[in-house]
Image (cartoon, coloured by chain):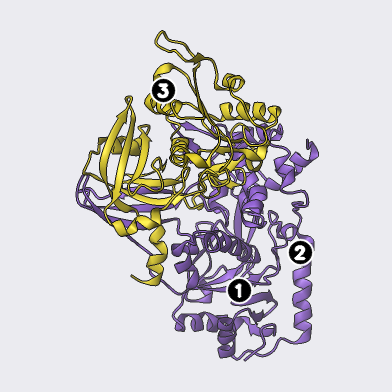
Chain colours: A yellow, B purple
Amino acid sequence: MSASASEAGYLLPEPAEIVEKRTYGSDIHAYRLRLCDPSARPRFDFMPGQFNMVYAPGVGEVAISISSDPDDEDLEHTIRIVGRVTRVIERLQVGDVLGLRGPYGHGWPLQEARWRDVLVVTGGLGCAPVTGAIDYMFRRRASYGRISILHGVKKPTDLVHRERFEAWRREPNCYVGLTSDTPERSWRDRVGVVTELFEEVEIDLDLTVVFMCGPEVMIRFAARILERRGVPASRIFVSMERNMKCAVGLCGHCQFGPEFVCKDGPIFSMPRIARFYGVRGL
Amino acid sequence: MPEPTQRLWLERSRLQQLLDSLGERGFEVHGPVVRDGALVLAPVRAVEELAVGWRESQAPGRYRIEQSGSERVFDVVNGPGSLKPFVFAAREPLIRVEMDGPGGGFRAHATLPEERAVAVVGVRACDLAALAVQDRVFLHDRYPDPYYAARRRGLFLVAVSCTRSASTCFCTSLDTGPEATTGFDVALSELEGGFVARAGSPAGEDLLAELALPEAPAETCVAERRALDACAEAMPRKLDPSDLPELLYDNLDHPRWDDVAERCLSCGNCTQVCPTCFCHDERDEPSLDSGHSLRVREWDSCFSLEHSYLHGMQVRSRIRDRYRQWLMHKLATWIDQFGSSGCVGCGRCISWCPVGIDLTQEVAALRERSA
C-alpha cells in the first residue's frame, strides 16, 4: 500500500461480525459486534458518547453511538430502524458481517465527572448515547457520587429499556425517575414532563455534573431550569444529533452554527452551543 | 536564475512559448476559453484557443460575453468555474468494496486519483485565495483529505493579476485581490503588448529562466502598478467585513431572512459556482450483481432539503433557514471553523444567481436594521 493510500485508511470500513442481536420493542436492535481482524481493536478504543459509522455493505453508513463498555472486547451498537440503511441492518442476523469505522467525536466528560454527583436527563426513545455512560459509571461505582437518572417518554410503550432502569434503580446512592407525558393504566411512575422530576431530586450545586440527551426542546427547558437553580452552565453537557455523511468534518451536513457535530461534538458543554441552541432551522 | 520578486517582460507573441514549455514539462495545460457563451477553464495548446479579445459584463443575475476585437488575452475576469474542480472533484469514488454476498464479508480499499501534472493559466487572485481557503479545509484539519492532496500536489498555477474587474467583484473588501500576491508559481499582469511576469515558487523560477525573459523596464513596472491600482480603485462593489461574524450571530431572527427567502429559489447555483463551498454527499453505488460497491462523493448544496435530513425530517425546512445557513457559513461560522472568511469576493454567486440576489446587499440590509 502506498503512503497516500494509507492516508485514506480512516475512510475504510472494518469488517465486524454480529455475535449477538437483542431486540427491544418493535424497532430497536442491539448488535454486539466483533472485529473480523482482532488486531484492529485498539484503533476502536473509545469513550461512551463517541460514535462509529456503521456500514451495511453496498448500501451505506449511519452514525450510531457505541453503547458497550470501553473495556469490553466487543463493540455494541443499539440501532433504531428509521431509514434506508437501518432497514437493511435490521435484516442482518448473528454471523452476518457489518462494517465499522471510527470512533469519531468526543465522548461524555467521564474523567472530569469523577468524584462528582451526576444528573442524567434523557427523553424520548432509546437515549442510546447516554446509556453507555451510565453503565460506565456503575461499573466504576466508587469513582462517582450520587447518580440521578431522569427519563421522560411521550407514552409508556416508548420506554423500551425498562429492565435497565429497574436495574439502575436498585443500585446504591442512585435515584431513577421515570415519567410519561400521557398516562396508561399499567404506568405506575409519574405522569408529566421530565423537568417536573427536578423537584424530586436533590442537586448539590457545587458537585453536580449534568448529562443530557433527547429532544432539543426538552434540553432547552431543562437547562434553563437547572441554571436557574444554580447549576453552572459549564457543568451541563448535551448530546447533539445532525445529519452525518463523512464523520470527519468535511461533508458539511452536520454543521450547527460554527460546530461540526461529528468532530466537535456530539457531546458539547452548554456554554459552547448556548448561543445557537434552540434557534429554529439552524 | 531570476530573483523571485524580479519582474520580467513577456511579449504577447511569446505567450505561446510559455504554454509550450509547460506542455514539455509534462503538464496538461488548462486556460480560460469561451464555451457556450461563458468563460471556462479547459485544456489548451495554443494561445488562439484562449479567450483572446473577449470581454464580459456581469451584474446580479446576468452574465454576457462579447468579442471586443482587442489583442488582450485575459480581459474576461471570470466564468462560473474556479480552481475548485481541479482539486475537489465534482464527483469521485472514495472507496471500492468487494462483497461476498448478503451478510457476508467484504474488503474495502481506497480509490485514490492518479496523480496528474496540471497547469492552469489565467488564475485570478480571488481564486488563489479560494484555493488557500480550501487547502485549510481539506489539508490542514484533523483528517487531511488524500484525494484533494493528490490533485493539489500536481497543480502548477500561472496567475493573472486583474487589470479589469467585473461589476460583481468585491475582492478589495476582503483583501484577496486584484493583484496576485501569493500562492502562484508564476504571476502575469497583462499590459499593452505583453505581460509583466514574476515567479512565486522555485518551479516558477525554473520555467521563467528557461524562457530567458528580459527584465521589465522601470516604466513598465510603473504602468503595471498604475493598472492594478486603477482596477482596485474602480471596483464598485463593497462588503464591509468589520463587524463579522458578530453581525450575523446577533441577527439570526432578522426580518431580512424572510425577505430574501421570498426571492431565493433555493436552486443552489451560488454553492456550485462558489470556489470555496465544500459540502458534499457520500453514497454507495453497488454494481448490479452486488459483487462490489463504490462509495462516491459528489458536490452537495446546503440549499437542498436533504442536506439537513434528520430522522425523517429536515432541520432547515424553510428557505430562510437555508439561505441563512449559507450566508452565515460563508461570512461568519467559517471564521470560527477555519480562521478566515469563506468568501473571497469573486462575485460569482451574484452573477449566477437566477434572481440576482447579491450577498453584499443582504449583509448591508442586515446591518441597516441590526438588532
Do the residues marked 2 and 3 share a common chain? no
Q: Earlier in the sequence, mark 2 or mark 1?
A: 1
- Please tell me in which quadrant of the rendered image residue B79 appears: bottom right
Front residue of B43 and B177: B177
Label 1 resides on the chain identified as B
Residue B323 screen position, x and y as percent: 61, 40
Residue B169's disc is none
Q: Residues within 10 Å of mark 1 (few under 14, many from 20)?
A: many
Name of the residue lying farthest toward the top: A185
Residue identifier under label 1: B184
Residue B357 screen position, x and y as percent: 65, 43
* Circle 2: residue type: Ala
Residue B232's disc is 2
User: Is disc 2 in contact with disc 1, using a CB cutoff of under 8 Å?
Assistant: no
* Circle 3: residue type: Leu
Q: In percent of the image, x 45 and y 37: which residue is there?
A: A138
- Cα–Cα span, label 2 and label 1: 20 Å
User: Would residue A204 be seen by someone viewing this image from the given angle?
Assistant: yes
Q: Is residue B202 above or below residue A24?
A: below
- Please tell me in which quadrant of the rendered image residue A85 appears: top left
Mark 2 falls on what kind of element? helix
Q: Is residue B305 above or below residue A224?
A: below
Residue A159's disc is 3
Apparent side of residue B370 relative to residue A211 in the rendered image (left or right): right
The quarter of the picture where the C terminus of chain B appears is: top right
Q: Residues within 10 Å of mark 3 (few under 14, many from 20)?
A: many
Mark 3 falls on what kind of element? loop
